[in-house]
Amino acid sequence: MQSAQPVANPFALLLNPAEVVAEMERSERLNRLSSRICRPLDKAHPSDKAHDAQIDASADEVPDFAEPARAT
């Protein structure tokens, strides 16, 4: 396994982003990380819709603003 060499000036990495990406792709430690692909435009799971409806219903019970106190 190749150990990463610390960089004296991390901003120097900005000068060669292709090399940084290549090192990231070769990194065994990064490849071992678990990952999942999130697609925000996917359809919601049916159980999520029920939960969202419950939250929406409870939010309707709470007033949006407080009534101002009236001076007598």
Image: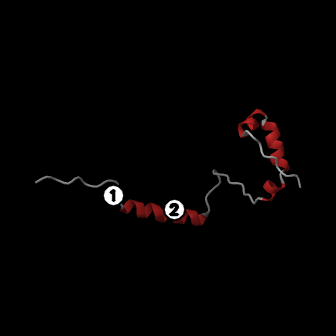
The residue most toward the right is: 1
Image disc number at residue 23: none
Q: Position of residue 46 (x, y in %)?
A: 60, 64
Quadrant of the frame with the N terminus: bottom right
Left or right of 45 in this view: 69: left
Eye-nearest disc, 2 or 1? 1
Secondary structure under tag 2 reads: helix
Taking the spot 72% from the left edge, 57% from the top edge, the residue there is: 36
Q: Find the distance from the CA under tag 2 to the CA under tag 1.
A: 19 Å
Q: Is residue 22 above or below residue 43?
A: above
Quadrant of the frame with the C terminus: bottom left
Q: Are marks 2 and 1 in contact (CB under 8 Å)?
A: no
- Name the image quarter holding residue 60: bottom left
Q: Is residue 32 above or below residue 15?
A: below
Q: Name the residue nearer the viewer: 68 or 52.
A: 68
Q: Is residue 60 above or below residue 21?
A: below
Q: Is residue 19 above or below residue 31?
A: above
Taking the spot 49% from the left edge, 63% from the top edge, the residue there is: 53
Image disc number at residue 52: 2
- Name the image quarter holding residue 37: bottom right
The residue most toward the left is: 72
The residue most toward the front is: 8
Q: Amino acid at mark 2?
A: Asp
Decide: few, some or many residues near mark 1? Use Cα within 10 Å; few <14, some 14-19, many ≥20.
Answer: few
Q: Position of residue 54 (x, y in %)?
A: 47, 65
Q: Name the residue nearer the viewer: 9 or 40.
A: 9
Q: Name the residue nearer the viewer: 61 or 66.
A: 66
Q: Amino acid at mark 1?
A: Pro
Specify how the rendered protein is coloured.
Answer: secondary structure
Decide: few, some or many residues near mark 2? Use Cα within 10 Å; few <14, some 14-19, many ≥20.
Answer: few
Image disc number at residue 63: 1
